Image (cartoon, grey):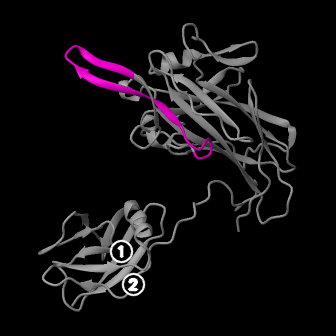
Amino acid sequence: MRKNGKRLVLSVGAVLTALCITAGVTMAWFHDTEPLAANFSAGKLDITVTPDQAEPGEQKIDFENLRPMTEKAFAEELAEADGNIVNANTEGYSPVPVYFHPVTVRNEGTLPAQVLFQMVDDGPDGKVDVDEITVENVTVNGQVYGEKVTQTGEQVTCDASNYILKDKLKIFVYQKNSEGNWEKVPNVNLNEASLEEGETAAFQPFTSEEPLPAGSENEEQFLIAGYLPEDAGNAYQAKHYHGVLLVYAGQVDEDAEWGPAEPEKLAAPTVYGEPEKAFYSDYYTISFQEDFDTVDAWKAAVQRVTVNGVEYSKTDYITFDSNQTYQLPLADNEIRIGSGSFQSGTTYHVVVEAEGYENFTCDIVAE
């Protein structure tokens, strides 16, 4: 059984962000999760547009004015001044580039804890951050002598069409080595969307074998870093990524349940009546009880359809000799399954997989 304990105590200042692990209620297994909104803005040639201020009480870390560079050049950007983590090159930039944010994990509970970092994509609208985020409209036009970048001055909504920074952005983690110097954790990239072979999107600095001891004096600082690779072209100017940094804390006991939980899924539509074979056409219609909007939202999330384990292909038109295809007609409470190869009297098990939904299943007994 999984239950939430107290939230991690979180404070964000100019120098560091403290994540404090606490536990003080009775439960089957103590575990804790702290969300921290993280916003990354790609740099452009003169200015960049940052997201609106977070809602009262929300904590966030903003990475500003990212620009493409080699990993070697990126590592050289990490510097310290007056005890603060800063970028080495800031002169002439506006706003000042911010590629690194310190994060301190402190155990203020009474139990030793294992700890896991994970970044979750918060989508174009940045739900944890603000109600609406806008970006500057930057156009890139191909020219004979190169690409022309134009800033229109217009603010446009950050939506799926321009929410592309996640495809390139790398989110690194740094920790101090035995000599007290910052060192990038190898093979860790918290942005799952840009993972390459050999990389992992999770970072576990404290394990059940080597946990973070209890007591507020036991703490360790890390750096979260936003890196834009050198092959990020003009298409990524002024684009955004909105993430939530989750820090999970769990008991060290064997079989303790902790870490990322499976998100709750929506129920799939409910079948209305029996599947019906179309007259003069080779497909079956499966109808649903729910309204058009509910069913259309589910259809938009459909990723895979199988019949007796065989994957079917999506088609926009289904009629005679339709075989191993399916159709999702909009504004219609039904789906259509091609039956050109169906044998009379045979039962065909249909499974529809949709992102964020439970699997839909239905049996068709061929006529």
Q: CA distance from mark 2 to mark 1?
A: 9 Å
Q: Residues within 10 Å of mark 1 (few under 14, many from 20)?
A: many
Which residue is depicted at the point 67% across and 36% down? 60
Residue 171 sits in quarter: top right
Residue 79 in percent (x, y) is at 64, 15
* Secondary-structure class at tag 1: loop
Q: Earlier in the sequence, mark 2 or mark 1?
A: 2
Task: Report the residue at 71% width, 20% height from top.
Answer: 179
Specify the segment rendered in magenta.
127-151
Foreground residue among 178 and 52: 52
Q: Is residue 195 visible?
A: no
Identify whether 288 is placed above or below 163: below
Which residue is the site of mark 2? 272
Residue 264: quadrant of the picture: bottom right
Q: Position of residue 344 (x, y in %)?
A: 19, 90
Residue 281 position, x and y percent, is: 15, 79
Residue 304, relative to residue 364: is it above or below? above
Secondary structure that dominates the magenta span: strand
User: Do the numbered discs 2 and 1 sit on residues whose CB atoms are within 8 Å?
Assistant: yes
Residue behind mark 1:
333
| Position of the N terminus by quadrant | bottom right
User: Looking at the picture, how far across and down is residue 324, in whole percent?
Assistant: 21, 71
Query: Does residue 81 appear in this view?
Result: yes
Residue 63 within the magenta-colored segment of the rendering = no
Few, some or many residues within 10 Å of mark 2 (<14, 14–19, 20+)? few
